[in-house]
Amino acid sequence: MVHVEHVGPAAVPEEARPHLVRMRDGVRLATDVYLSGAGEPGPTVLIRLPYDKTGTYTFVPQVAGYLTARGYHVVAQDVRGKFRSEGETLLFVNEAADGYDTIDWVARQPFSDGVVGMWGDSYYGYTQLAAVSTGHPALRAISPRVTGTRLGELPVDVPGEPTRAVEMFVSRLYPCTYYHGRDVYQWVPDWSRRPFAASVEEFFEQVGSRSASWDQWFPHPVLLRRFPFGHPFDAPAIPVLLTIGWWDNCAPWQWSDHDRIARGGAWSLLEHLVIEPIDHENNYLPDDDGQAPKATLSDMLDPTVEFFDVHLRGLRPAGSIPRVRWTLARTGEVRESESWPPPGVVPVDLHLTADGRLAGEAEAAGGPAELTWVHDPDDLVPSPTANAFDFLNPMPDERAWADRDDVLVFDGPPTEADDDLVGGARLTVTVSSSGPRMDVFARLLDVRPDGAAHLVARGQVHVVDASAPQAVELDLGQLGYRLRAGHRLRLHVASSDFPEYVPQPGTGEHPWLAVDVARNTQRLGLGDVQARLRLHRLPPG
């Protein structure tokens, strides 16, 4: 038996007024109203979440108190199938219609002036994007944090596409913990034995019920439409404040949203960014003493209050708040710009060499070469932390990974002066394997003079057919990082990151179902542009 912690709903606080709000199909969703002042008509902030609207994990009552003290009514709701709400517990697919119906209900209440905004992290950032897709006229602005329209997306092979994303374990496990039923079931599978899916079946037997979302996705995903009214960014544009964490493991989905918005159109004119040195759980980048402070309510909410004061209450003109507000990590400096990346960044190319260097083009070896390593499913490269969502608490020292035979290491020279790395990072490599499939992981590290190595950026890709050399690109995300004088860059390349990501068994079988495994020899081509790391630098001044 696995150890399971069963967490039910917390008590509704006295200051909340509970309601059951009826959706179009008759299902009623548990909803709490927090009034500002005497409850006169005014703008309302809606928070729709699956984590218990009264629970300690998301401290929504405290958030409501902070917002009501600043002139906003707050409505918090358990989404369909969660905690006190009725309906089937099913990930993602009901949030658009339920969001529309809830906004409609809010706008008709006596405390409402017909203006609604939405706020929240992660899944309750996603519920904002789903609601936007419906085009409800009362929804005037949203503030989604550490989230994205593709949040929790399960990678699938696409015919003709040589690569796809690597599957995170949490993607399929989430329906067995937070989305198994109305309540939360906290548990961890037994990773020491295969098949990995056996632990899930034992959990279902232990609790006496199954997860509809697990069965929908396993073993072969049936992907229902998240946005039946159309993609959120094809809906009428409204002001949006995206908060992105440099070390958020979900940041790639939010950067993907920014990239789509930045292509042009009305959404690009109404987008604002806040980019901070935080992880998914709102821990800040530790200081030199290793302390990782937690974001306060003020840290989390003040940018949103400022944003809503403009777009929900009209207290100031839109031009009074910056389009982009970003923190240069390792400095504490908060900077402003009109776009991301900021003007003036220049590309810098570093080449991976056979002798383990990150070198400029003039220093790189010109001829072809190849490095190999062994992917052993019985001795996987361990993830640096047990909880990737809580990565900065504490931020791991990854120097020991450089001693593993299954991790390729490339070092740059110590910097002579502070070097501000700002903008996109991308690794281009040519890889192949003796096995049918292959995962490639890259981690860019800041190595201090004392040898400590800490993550700056990372990326990964799954190669669907690795039997022949494939040129692949790994998006390492966006950087806003000062590499201090005397520090050096280091790049790790490997083919597993366990248990954050589902490892390849080496046989080509479904990784959740495989019992037998095989060792694979992995190859990385070098020379010319076969292995190149492209960064961007913000020149001094």
Image (spheres, rainbow, N blue to C red):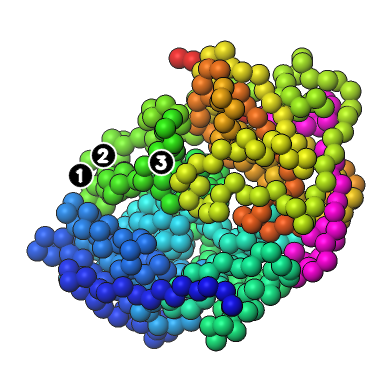
Q: Horizontal placement of 39 versus 45: left or right?
A: left
Residue at the image position 80 percent from the left and 25 percent from the top = 355
Q: Amino acid at mark 2?
A: Pro
Q: CA distance from mark 1 to mark 2?
A: 7 Å
Classed neighbour count for the residue bearing mark 2: other residues with Cα under 10 Å, few (<14), some (14–19), many (≥20): few
Q: Amino acid at mark 1?
A: Leu
Instruction: Name the residue carrying label 3.
Output: 292
Classed neighbour count for the residue bearing mark 3: other residues with Cα under 10 Å, few (<14), some (14–19), many (≥20): some
| Closer to the eye: label 3 or 1 | 3
Q: Position of residue 370 (x, y in %)?
A: 87, 33
Instruction: Name the residue carrying label 2.
Output: 317
* Residue span colored magenta: 505-534
Which one is in front, 8 or 126?
8
Q: How many numbered dots are placed on residues in this image?
A: 3
Residue 69 visible in the snapshot: yes
User: Which image quarter: residue 303?
Assistant: top left
Instruction: Name the residue carrying label 1.
Output: 315
Q: CA distance from mark 3 to mark 1?
A: 35 Å
Q: Looking at the rendering, in which quadrant would you find the C terminus?
A: top left
Secondary structure state at the residue bearing disc 3: loop
Q: CA distance from mark 3 to mark 2?
A: 36 Å
User: Which image quarter: residue 166?
Assistant: bottom right
Q: Position of residue 38 (x, y in %)?
A: 9, 64
Residue at the image position 59 percent from the left and 81 percent from the top = 204
